[in-house]
Every structure is written in C-alpha cells, then in structure tokens.
Image (cartoon, rainbow, N blue to C red):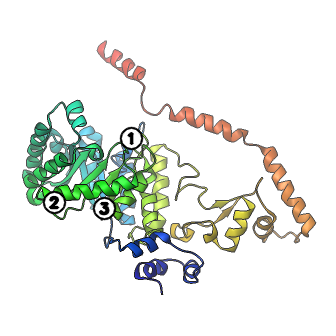
Amino acid sequence: MPKLKMRKFLKKLPPSYAEVFEKGWLHNYTIEYHEATGTSFPAAVIIGDQTLRDGEQQTGVIFSPEEKVEIAKIFSEMNVTTVEIGFPAVSEEEVKACKMIHAENLKFIPFVMSRARTSDIDKALEADAKAVDLFTSSSEFHIRSKLKLTPEENIEMYCKAAEYARDHDLTIIMGREDCSRSHLPYLAKLIVAAKEVGGNKFAGFGVSDTTGSLTPTTTIWLYKRIVKELEDAGYPGASPGIHCHNDLGLAVANTLASIEAGGRGVSGTFTGIGERAGNAALEEVIMALETLYGFKTRINLEKMVEVCELISKYAGVPIPVNKPIIGQNVFKHEAGIHAAGVLAHPYTYEAIPHDWLGKQSIFRYGKFSGTDVILKDALKDSGLPEPDRKELLEITFAVKKVQIDKGIEIFRKFVDTYQQTMAQMGMSREEVIDIARQILKK
C-alpha cells in the first residue's frame, strides 16, 4: 500500500499514469526518499512572482503599464499568491502602472519595491501601495563598497526607513541583498532590529541568493543556520521565503532545496527573466513541486504557458525551444525510439502529464525518425493505402533524405540574426553620450 504522500501524488495523476506506479513499474524517488527520511513539508507553498519588477530589470526589457496590467490579471487567474508589481521610484510611468494594477483589486497580494529611503517610500505611497519590499544590503562587502556605510550605519538607516513606512501604515516585507554571502550573526541582528521597529506591520523576510552563489546542499545548510541564528537572536519560529538568481544555473534547484529545509515561500519570475542570467523560473519550480514532490500548488497550470508566452512577447525575449515546461520542444519527439515509446504511453519519455499544461505530444519527422511513427502517426488517417514493410522503409528513408537535404542553413542564419538582435537590447554607452551631448549643447 503506498504511503500517504504517494497516495496524494497518485490521486493527482491521470489514471493511466497512476496505474504504472500502482503496478510497481515506476518509482517517484523524490517522494519515497522524503517518506523514508520523515521530511516534513508545509501544507502549502506561497508562490511569489517578481516578473513585473525583477524580470523587467533584464537588459532592454520594458513593459508598458497596460502590458503590466494584462500580465497581472493572468497572475490573478492563476492563483499566484503575491506579486511584486513594480518599483515606483524608477519613473512616473512606473507609478502609473502600479496605480493601475492596484485599482484592479486582483486576487493576489500586491507589493512594490522600495530602497531604505523616505523618497522611495513616498513614491510607493503615491502608487497607492499598501505593502513594500523594503530592502538594503546584508553582506559587509555590499554595505561598505556599494552603500559606503558601516554595518551599524546600515542597520540605523534601515530602521529609520522601516519606521517611516510603518508610520505611513505600509506593510513591510524585508528584502536584503546578498544574504548568501553575508556574516550570519550580522544578518540576524539586522532582521531582528527591523522586526522590532516594524512591529505588527513587519510581514516577514526572504533569503536572497543575489549572485547565484549557493548549491542545493548549501542552501539547506544556510537556510537552517539562518533560522537558528534568528532563534538565538530572539526571533524564534522564522520561516523565510527564498529568492534565487541563476548565475550558475542553480536557481530552481536551490529554490526547491529551501522547501526541503523547511521554507514555505518561493519567489522568482515566469520564464526566468531578470538581471544577468535571470531568476528562478517559476514555471519550473511549480511543475517540480507538482510532479516530483506531489504538492498541490493551487496554480492554474494551463494558464502558465499562456502567461509565459505573453511575457516573452512583451519582453521581446524569445522562449528557447528546449526551455523546460514551456519550450516548443518539451512534448515534441523525432527520434524513432522515443516516438515509439510515446506512442505506447506518453509517460515513457514525458516527465509531465501534458494535459496538465493543455498540451499534447507532437511528432516531427526527419533524420532520426523510425517506421513506427511514420506508420502510426504521420500516415494515420491520411487516406493513403497502408504500405507494406518494403514501402514503409522506402517512405521512411525518403523522409530522412528530404529533411537532410533541406538542411539547417536557414536556422543557422536565424541564430546569427537572433544573437545580433539581442546584443542590441539596452542602450550602449555611446548612445548615452550622444544624448548627453545634445542636451548639454542647449
């Protein structure tokens, strides 16, 4: 008899998928491992999106206020828990966008970003914000090199800003850059000081891996150490969320590791867009929680592909064809061995029930195609007479030859064009100098 976690997981699956586990033909070792080790997971995971702020910080990406509202409405339909809708201090256009989203009264909890400055907080208030991601740096390197402060001055600056936000009835979500490289006793001291000043307006904090410097193993260790440091500093029972960047390609893995360490909240961006190498791709985090851990995230999974494609369109950043979950090739098969397996049962080579995403298996034909997929898929319902074995082989090899002759030169040219186009995102130093020259001549 499967244990409780596995039974819940099987209940979610389409019947033909659950059957192969019930027969013992497949194992979900993620669930089996955690059942065997007695890992305790939260009843629910908070899904926090930062596409409209951190995602927009990707070089060259600009969302109009109307585009932000359209994306935000889909987040609401998807049941995303919290959404960072913008950074009002950036521009009047950003204030407008935040006001427009607040006016929609959507289902998620909206908040805006603010540095630990009263001027930023005033802009948040102008944007009708009720909650702010009030952030500062936490590593001594950031504090001394970037902020030009001492660690104690940083705490004093943050607490003054938190007091100002509290006195203006703003809920405070504490953000701290570079947690993953910070001195932990200082990090705890900073958080406890902010919590004391924020009082009942202090809503919590997250662990930020700003430079993608963690591994899954160190994420678990660090997360537990931070919780212990806070307990020793007089803040017991803390359960921070996590925010991971993808500089070394580990953002999703580290985000999942935080849940294994006891975390109850994750943040990231849909499609993974963001500064440098981007953020934890929320569609990947969500599907891993659903398919590997057996969580029911409450996210409308079919809407995920829709919102990612919309974000890609408005951001001007194409989705790679092999991008997990949302790429065009995720459920596409050409190799004969794989195609034959998927024809027998999609779970043979597809890790996700494609119905969950409103998708279906797709077969393409070329160099690696086999006779099985040509006969059972390509020629099915074609109205042509069924070929004998010799004819089928002839058709299959003709398909291979045509595809090979067709070549990939057109695609190679496309890649060159793509790279040249993406290199132009954002403005160059020379363009800025030209603008400044024209203004300074006035």
Q: Position of residue 297 (x, y in %)?
A: 38, 69
Mark 2 vs mark 3: which is more N-terminal?
A: 2
Please name the residue shown 35% across and 16% down the image: 438
Residue under circle 1? 275
Q: Secondary structure at mark 2?
A: helix
Instruction: Say which amino acid is labelled 1.
Output: Glu
Q: Secondary structure at mark 1?
A: loop
Proximity of marks 1 and 3: CB atoms separated by less than 8 Å: no
416 vs 55: above or below:
above
Mark 1 vs mark 3: which is more N-terminal?
A: 3
Proximity of marks 2 and 3: CB atoms separated by less than 8 Å: no
| Viewer-closest of 318 and 127 | 318
Q: Secondary structure at mark 3?
A: strand
Instruction: Say which amino acid is labelled 3.
Output: Gly
Mark on residue 439? none
| Viewer-closest of 40 and 345 | 40
